[in-house]
Image (cartoon, rainbow, N blue to C red):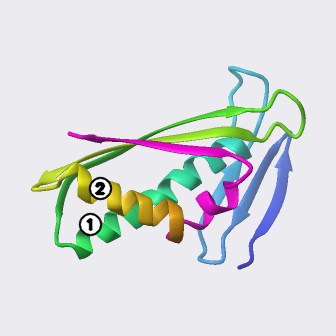
Amino acid sequence: MKTIIKYNHGNHFSGETASGHLMHWDSGPKDSVTNGPTPMEGMLQAGAVCSAMDVVSILKKRRKEITRFDLEIEAERAEDHPKIFTTYRIIYRVGGNSITREEVEKAVKLSQDKYCSIINMLIPEVAVDYEIEIV
């Protein structure tokens, strides 16, 4: 994998991914106008969406029709630098015809234990946890 990051101004950077997508990153004082998420906000979402893509793929392979799939992600950070995540919790809200908690649980475990690269990079430094809600 390869990417190119360019400095724009202030704390605003933009990067182009190998697949040609442009991403903006920024940080500033609380409540200030920025041009994109902070790197930690990006990391927070990246781990969850990595797992979500796995879970959706697994459920679809099992011929499950997903009518709703939402995530809520909560994390805590260390007080001292480098202020890494100390906890990382994903709430999976999944709905669909004939989707059971057990099926979602199996898919989430496969994702978090085997497939999701980002979640597995967080472990063992971060306490990763999840909850499943069938909606």
Q: Is residue 128 one of those drawn in magenta?
A: yes
Q: Quadrant of the N terminus?
A: bottom right
Query: Which quadrant holds residue 20?
Result: bottom right
What residue is drawn where x is 25% and y is 76%? Answer: 61
Disc 1 secondary structure class: helix
Q: Quadrant of the C terminus?
A: top left
Q: Earlier in the sequence, mark 1 or mark 2?
A: 1
- Packing grade of label 1 (10 A; few <14, some 14-19, many >=20) is some
Location of residue 124 with respect to 134 vertically, above or below = below
Q: Are marks 1 and 2 in contact (CB under 8 Å)?
A: yes
Query: Residue 25 or 53: which is nearer the viewer?
Result: 53
Disc 2 secondary structure class: helix
Residue on which the image places disc 2: 104
Residue 87 coordinates in the image, percent (x, y)? 64, 38
Residue 104 coordinates in the image, percent (x, y)? 29, 55
What residue is drawn where x is 63% and y is 62%? Answer: 120
Location of residue 128 with respect to 119 vertically, above or below = above
C-alpha separation, residue under disc 1 versus residue under disc 2: 7 Å
* Residue type pointed to by label 2: Val
User: Which region of the structure is painted magenta?
Assistant: 115-135
Residue 36 coordinates in the image, percent (x, y)? 65, 43
What residue is drawn where x is 74% and y is 56%? Answer: 14
Residue on which the image places disc 1: 59
Q: Is residue 17 one of those drawn in magenta?
A: no
* Residue type pointed to by label 1: Leu
Query: Residue 61 or 18: which is nearer the viewer?
Result: 61
